[in-house]
Image: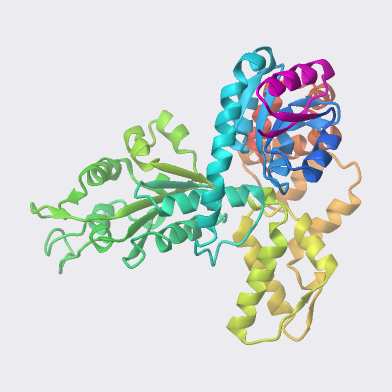
Amino acid sequence: MAAVLIIDDDRLFAETVADKLDSLRHVSHAMHTLTTGLEAAVAGNYDIVLLDVYLPDGNGLQAIDRLRSVPSEPQVIIITGQGDPDGAELAIRHGAWCYLEKNSIVKEIALPLTRALQYRQALSSQKAVLKTVERDQLVGESPRFAHCLEIMAKAAAAEASVLISGESGTGKEAFARAIHANSHRRNGNFVVVDCTALPEQLVESVLFGHVKGAFTGADRANRGLIRHADKGTLFLDEIGELPLSTQKSFLRVLQERAFCPVGSQEECKSDFRLICATNRDLAAMAEQNLFRDDLLYRLRGMSLTLPPLSEREGDIPLLVDHFLNRLIQRYGQEKKECLPDFMEYLASYSWPGNVRELSQAVESAFAQAVYSPMLFTQHLPVHIRTAHARAHVRGKETAVHSFIQASGATVLSWREAKDTFEREYTRNILHQSDGNIMEAGRLSGLSRTRLYQLIKKYPEV
């Protein structure tokens, strides 16, 4: 028997679903607004939440993270009377169990409900394993980040290739190192290959090695990084930058774990685990013939998508504390107190450079406060202080002004300017409509599909 929370403004529909759940021997409670639903989820001990998308006081899709972060950590099943493919994708990406249309839910609810409960039960044993995982550099407790830690723990216990995606600065290499450190290959080498720094004419030599005299300047043999990763992990950072000509050669290495050094006919073998990282959309690149789709299939044995810092609610104070402790140990100084307004400035900033930018900002403030026992807002980099000042005086400033603020004195390309304007416009319209997609459509004149496209394109809004 499970406890199910129904959040739907259609009272008759909620009663119908409750009757169905009762016939399946589950206990249910119904709330008819997003606000009361969230309050009930926090106060109760629910296993499953059935969540409508279009509610009087907000959009259900934007509440998935908050619902999954309540103490009981329920699985969320989206129910909607207006099925939309973009909404379905957005729901799954934010951790919903599945996406069901109301006209068929009475017939279809039993199986996904059973599977979600079985998965929830299996998670309890996984969490025990997660507590033993080494995660020194992986700091955070937000729902999106916790989900990434769960995938990391699973990847560490497996041998499949892992593709880590995310914006620059989100911690892709840190996750790759954690997978290696928690795997049975931890005593082997962790070999990092920065694909952006590989000269195209020498990339095969760097990866596969070469024999002496293989080309002009090869005055001695080179084992190559792939052979160096034998019994360990090969980490290809920014795999999207790997030349197409090399992708074909590397595909065979993945299939056979065998290769020939440049200038040699003698085949070498290497038993390595592959982890790749990218900040690009490799699937879109494959559609444009910029990346081999057969290689992409090989890379995606397991996929891990890291959220931007702006979507990691509550993690900034934890990260700041982690960075400060590291700086205190490095420089042998006394602990410094973070004043509340100092933390407020950090929490309100958008962090386009993600965790890496936050780390640099904390280090800069620490250096500025070298003789102070406390960290003041004045110690922060000027661009963070000016962003905070503008955000608190602009009132009803338009998205155009926001986009000029974002560009600063830099001359943007047309595409950059368009993307910046779209992002700020989407942020403003969702703020004015309190996240209600129907209201946002009314205010903006945009279709629901177009709004979902913008939310998908700019998830940080």
List x then y, in percent, for residue 439: 83, 25
Q: Quadrant of residue 64?
A: top right
* Quadrant in which the C terminus is drawn: top right
Q: Residue at x 91, y 52 (%)?
A: 393
142 to 381, vertically: above or below: above
Q: Nearer the viewer, residue 224 or 66?
A: 66
As drawn, the residue found furthest toward the left would be: 265
List x then y, in percent, for residue 163: 43, 46
116 to 86, vertically: above or below: below
Residue 3 in magenta stretch: yes
The magenta region covers: 1-29
Q: Residue at x 69, y 70 (%)?
A: 321
211 to 371, vertically: above or below: above
The answer to whether one can see residue 80 in this image is yes
List x then y, in percent, for residue 287: 42, 28
Q: Residue at x 45, y 34 (%)?
A: 283
* Quadrant in which the N terminus is drawn: top right
334 sits to left or right of 155: right
152 to 56, vertically: above or below: below
Q: Quadrant of residue 323?
A: bottom right
